[in-house]
Image (cartoon, helix red, strand yellow):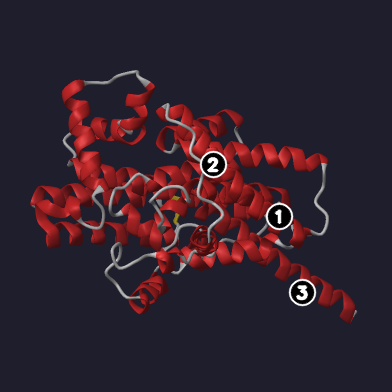
Amino acid sequence: MIFYSLQTILILVILLFLARQNNRFDLYLTLFATVWAIAVLAIRMIYGVDQANFYSSDQGTQIGLLNQLTKEGFSFSLDRIIGGRYIVVAPVWLLRTFGLDSLLAFKFLQALCLVFTYRLCSEFIRNQEIKVRLWHAILFSGPLFIFLSALGLRDLEIVLSVSYFYLGRIPFLRFIALTIAALLRPHLAVALIFGWLMTQWLARHPIRRRPLAIIGITIGGFMLGGYGYAIGALFKYSINYKSPIIFTQDTWWRMFANLLGLQFLTFGNDIVKLTVQQLLLLRLFFIDTFLIPILFIFTLLNQNLQNSTLRLQVFISFVFFLGLASQTDFNSSRQNLPFLSIMGVLALTGILKTKDQRSTDKTLKSK
């Protein structure tokens, strides 16, 4: 425990170094580094050597993949690269060669991803001539992101990839981000490409009657995602084509629940032992899980905002992704997490820009 604590403190120093920008410490990044270190140490003290089983079995799975890589070495097979999660495991393998604890290395990697996601989104906000404030981070690097960074799961690497795909300025790095997303979640990359292609088509056929068009895009994108999953399964597993389950009440209820970040309402007692009241109380802490999608949809309907095309692209990819995911057994906040940062930062800038525009209009009318 002493050695683990010393390594955690060393990482804390590194994170605090990254928190320093323009000769001063960024308040959010400083608080994040401190909270992250305390959370990591608390999990280790409470659960001991069994901490890999805390919250998700995915942590244990990644440790197993790391041990497999160490034992068998690297393979250039695409199936092995994807199945072995090389994009996550390989950097941890390198850190472990320097003596860093395996699970702590996974957590450190995810903490770095959160730092760079925050910086990317903050830069985008500043480019919109908006001063970044501490509370803004709730919408793109909030409680759920911090919690997952302390677990060491792969989610935040996916979040960073998706965020850079939409907000990055360097085309080559945007392609790299898309490739990373594809290696971690292939169906996610398909959704990103689909959204981009649809936006290119819509650029030549502008949307009229936006609210009605959004409803059509939601239904159509979700259905196409379901059929996309069926076609993908046909090629990947070489099985007979099986029509997706789309035209059922449960499927559409699941879609709208995910759309608003309320997917926990679809869980049965066989999946989650907590009551609905307990789940609602928990969501008050992880407020970003439902606040972000609701605010994003609110700003999506305002076609006069800047970056309206980008909002539409994100939304199309999101509903298509929900259609893909609806054909699986996975349905949680982690499933939607890749889109939360980009949706959150677009919602934030949309709301603040609308507020500034109203203030300007009010001032002009009073003169």
Q: Residue at x 25, y 61 (%)?
A: 39
Residue 364: x and y, percent?
87, 74
Tell me, yes or no, whether the two marked residues, 1 and 2, touch with CB atoms within 8 Å: no
- Which quadrant holds residue 247? bottom right
Q: Is residue 133 above or below residue 50?
A: below
Along the line of sight, which residue is nearer the eye, 35 or 17? 35
Q: Is 235 displayed left or right of 273 in the figure?
A: right
- Element carrying mark 1: helix
Residue 360: x and y, percent?
80, 71
Indicate which label's residue lies in the foreground, 3 or 2. Answer: 2
Q: Residue at x 37, y 30 (%)?
A: 82
Indicate which label's residue lies in the foreground, 1 or 2. Answer: 1
Amino acid residing under circle 2: Tyr
Real-space CA distance between mark 3 and mark 1, rounded to the nearest whole angstrom? 33 Å
Q: Is 252 displayed left or right of 109 in the figure?
A: right
Residue 311 seen in the figure: no
**Residue 359: image tag:** 3
Residue labelled with disc 2: 164
Q: Residue at x 74, y 54 (%)?
A: 306
Q: Is 254 displayed left or right of 347 in the figure?
A: left
Real-space CA distance between mark 3 and mark 2, rounded to the nearest whole angstrom? 32 Å
- Which quadrant holds residue 83? top left
Residue labelled with disc 1: 216
**Residue 187: image tag:** none
- For the C terminus, the image quarter is bottom right
Q: Is residue 48 above or below residue 170?
A: below
Amino acid residing under circle 3: Ser
- Element carrying mark 2: helix
Indicate which label's residue lies in the foreground, 3 or 1. Answer: 1
Residue 339 seen in the figure: yes
Residue 91: x and y, percent?
31, 33
Amino acid residing under circle 1: Gly
